[in-house]
Amino acid sequence: SGNDDIAFHFNPRMDQKVAMNSFRNGGWEAEESVSDNPFKKGEAFEMFTVIKTEGYQVYVNGNELYTFKHRIPLEKVTMLNINGDVGVNLFGYIK
């Protein structure tokens, strides 16, 4: 895994689907998506991700949305990056 690899890319496309993917060895891999998009433009939401042995389990507004299976070993993941047109009111983690 190179320094530019992305283990879990989460992309809610407003009024469309929620797309998930990983980027490895210079290219995007097979996209996985959920058509039942709980995100609405301008509406607040609560989201948390549980990192389990089988993958990234995503919850939105208290409901399980999807589990994205690991493609890059967890021990190689070193950073979390949140960007885009989103305001973060609270961020935390439990080890």
Image (tube, grey):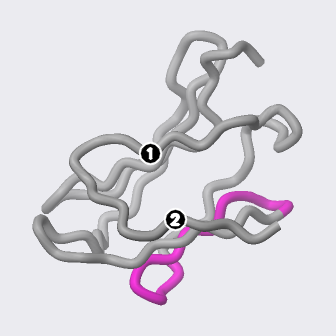
**What x and y, as percent, mark residue 18?**
34, 57
Dividing the picture into quadrants, the one containing residue 42 is: bottom left
Q: Crowding near pointer 1: few (<14 within 10 Å), some, many (20+)? A: few
**What x and y, as percent, mark residue 64?**
53, 81
| Residue span colored magenta | 53-64
**What x and y, as percent, mark residue 54?**
80, 61
Is residue 71 placed above or below 39 in the rendered structure? above
Q: Nearer the viewer, residue 61 or 53?
A: 61
For the residues carrying marks 1 and 2, which lies nearer the camera in this image? Answer: 2
Marks 1 & 2, CB-CB < 8 Å contact: yes
Dividing the picture into quadrants, the one containing residue 24 is: top right
Q: Residue shown at 48%/49% (left/top)? A: 32
Dividing the picture into quadrants, the one containing residue 50 is: bottom right
Tally of numbered discs: 2
Q: Residue shown at 74%/47% (left/top)? A: 70
86 is within the stretch colored magenta:
no
Q: Which mark is residue 82?
A: 1
Q: Residue shown at 40%/78% (left/top)? A: 46
- Amino acid type of the residue that numbered disc 2 sits on in the rendered structure: Phe
Is residue 19 placed above or below 35 in the rendered structure? above
Name the side, left or right, on which 67 lies relative to 30: right
- Amino acid type of the residue that numbered disc 1 sits on in the rendered structure: Ile
Is residue 75 placed above or below 93 in the rendered structure? above
Q: Give the residue at mark 2.
A: 91
